[in-house]
Image (spheres, rainbow, N blue to C red):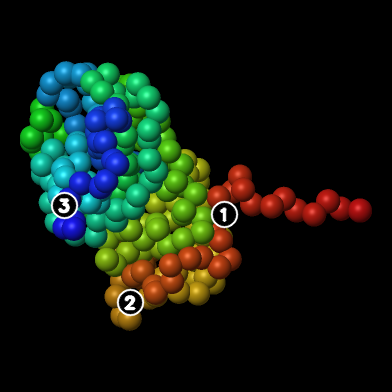
Amino acid sequence: MSDNSPVAGYDKYAYEPFAVTVDLAVFTLRSGRLHILLVERGHDPYAGRWALPGGFLEPHESAEGAARRELAEETGLADVAGLHLEQLRTYSEPGRDPRMRVVSVAFAALVPDAPQAHGGGDAARADWLPYGTQSPLAFDHDRILADAHDRIGGKLEYTCLATAFCPREFTLGELRQVYEVVWGTDLDPANFRRKVLATPGFVEQVPGASRLTGGRGKPAALYRAGDATSLHPPLLRPAHEPSERPRR
């Protein structure tokens, strides 16, 4: 029996048809603020509303392949250097799409140096908007976006994901800014530097490289991502750090 032969006893018409889509929550840093990549829908449902880039999965492609294709088609971001893409979760609640039953595989993505976006395909336009300033999004994309932001904020504590926001070579001040922007809190520069340099494999200094960062101080040393994938000990956000032991 060939791979395309029907399976005995199976009736494909016994089940309601449904579609599988992909949606992408793409983040970057611009001018010291966290930005999200959005597209304006060019047709109903939700014509004219902002939404996450995404679309329907084709029969011949994987979910990640569809995500990369839709990102290129709807925003013009194809083969972006340094793009970090990871699967977030699946959204399958009935009624999330007014057209039919739709199950979405969502992805979170990070871009270190965001190129200009251009709308294409069924997206009227595409643009980077500061995170938290966007109007309500189409479908359940507000939930997907919030979940992606939570995922990234959590992974900054235990993994080296923060370096995916940075250029290939960066200062510790630029790395600290990633944490401050995503977490929404200021960090003590000296304390942050101490923790980063004490974490094996997090970053490695570029020999002899430095960069002027403004002011009258000496040039800042440049670093690049190390070979570690997880942080030991974790770099906890201030609200999550354990409190001091009570005095007797």
Please report whichever mark, 2 or 1, sits nearer to the chain's N-terminal start: 2
Please report whichever mark, 3 or 1, sits nearer to the chain's N-terminal start: 3
Which quadrant holds residue 218? bottom left
Question: Relative to residue 169, is residue 21 depicted above or below?
Answer: above
Give the label, 2 or 3, closer to the camera: 3
Q: Residues within 10 Å of mark 3 (few under 14, many from 20)?
A: few
* 146 horizontally vs 19: left or right: right
x%, y% of residue 27? 31, 44
The CA distance from mark 3 to mark 1 is 52 Å
Answer yes or no: do the residues labelled 3 and 1 have beta carbons within 8 Å? no
Q: Residues within 10 Å of mark 2 (few under 14, many from 20)?
A: some
Work out whether residue 48 or residue 239 is closer to the camera in this orientation and state it: 48
Which quadrant holds residue 160? bottom left
Which quadrant holds residue 91? top left
Q: Which amino acid does the dot numbered 2 rest on?
A: Val
Question: Relative to residue 127, is residue 165 depicted above or below?
Answer: below
* 189 horizontally vs 77: left or right: right
Q: Which amino acid does the dot numbered 3 rest on?
A: Asn
The CA distance from mark 2 to mark 3 is 55 Å
The residue tagged 2 is: 206
Name the element at disc 3: loop
Residue 132 in sight in this render: no
x%, y% of residue 103? 32, 34
Work out whether residue 127 or residue 49 is closer to the camera in this orientation and state it: 49
Q: Which amino acid does the dot numbered 1 rest on?
A: Leu
Q: Residue at x 26, y 36 (%)?
A: 11
Query: Residue pushed farthest front?
Result: 8
- Disc on res. 4: 3
Work out whether residue 25 or residue 193 is closer to the camera in this orientation and state it: 25
The residue tagged 1 is: 236
